[in-house]
Image: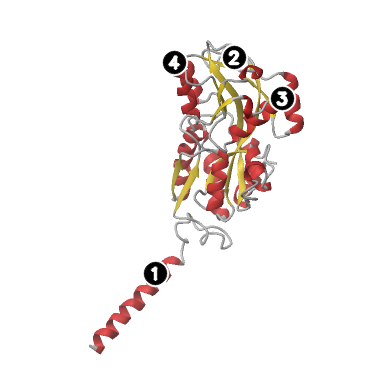
Amino acid sequence: MKKAKLMLASIVMASMALLAACGSGNGGGNAGGGEGGNAGSGDPSQMVIATGGTGGTYYPLGGAMAEQIKEATGIATTAEVTGASAENMRLIKDGDAHIAFVQGDIADYASKGVNMFQEDGKIENFQALGALYNETVQIVVAADSNINSVADLKGKRVSVGSPGSGTEANAQQILEAYGMTFEDLELQRLSFSDSSKAIQDGQLDAAFQTAGAPTAAITELAATKGVKVIPLDADKIASLIEKYPYYVEETIPGNTYQTVPDDVKTVSVRAILVVKSDLSEDLVYKATKAIFENTDKLPAKKEAIKAENALQGISLPVHPGAQKYYDEKGVK
């Protein structure tokens, strides 16, 4: 009996030693080691990219980037459908996402604990990976609608995006420039896809959608019912930019959508990627390189997403792994 117990104890000790040896290598799935002891402890065996709704630009881009990151790092990476910017920041905060698409203005709010983050307080466990492209504020109505200006939205059924989204914040600020508030609307908070479907079905008059143009949900609506995109007045654009400097003037070129032949003046913000700060330099370096050196494989925005523009409009600290890549490329 004593001999059997000694043998069992020996097996247990050997198993523990083997586990310890396995755990001392690449640190739970960190790909490719790393430099200066950087790799290892903080890196996950699986990663989540928080994106947005299926009708926007974030989700298809996230799916393609997940494949590129998986190939470059060896870490299983998946893109998840979310409520977009504000929700994505909370997913990063809670550790439920590792990389996230966010509007630059929303990331700035999160870092300061203001606006929709006032109650939660500052989010401090993230850094920027880089900027991607301009996200255009688009106010969409049916082609046969009698709505032709922001002022015409008063009293109408209007979606301002998912609750707590960047689109919601943009809608609030644009209405403010026109002397209006959400109380002036029959307010709804729908995703891009649900907004377009509601316009298609005659259950919604207008929808704010902040996303890279062309936006899938708007393209689909243009092909079925036809759309108009409501322009912003020049003086309102100027006042928005003066009060909220993260906005830039943007022109949606004519024929971006098949029923919108003329240019449309509006504003945009930068779409950026953020990452959890505790991811290793090596992992974020490889992820950054994978994204910016495979833009030809992206389903959208491949012409706009360039390493040389990746630090434009970034108001946040950049993760050291991403900065290493930009330094190699001479990006300032």
Classify mark 3: residues with Cα within 10 Å, few (<14), some (14-19) or many (20+): few
Residue 298 location, x and y as percent? 49, 33
Colouring scheme applied when the structure was drawn: secondary structure
Label at residue 179: 3
Whole-Å distance between the Cαs marked 3 and 2? 17 Å
Look at the numbered discs 4 and 3 and tell me whether their residues touch, using CB distance below 8 Å: no
- The residue type indicated by label 4 comes to Thr
Residue at image location 47% in from the left, 17% down from the top: 202
Name the one closer to the observer, 306 or 66.
66
| Image quadrant in which you'd find residue 4 | bottom left
Residue 168 location, x and y as percent? 59, 33
Per the image, the residue denoted by label 1 is 19
| Image quadrant in which you'd find residue 247 | top right
Per the image, the residue denoted by label 2 is 147
Look at the numbered discs 1 and 3 and tell me whether their residues touch, using CB distance below 8 Å: no
Whole-Å distance between the Cαs marked 4 and 1? 59 Å
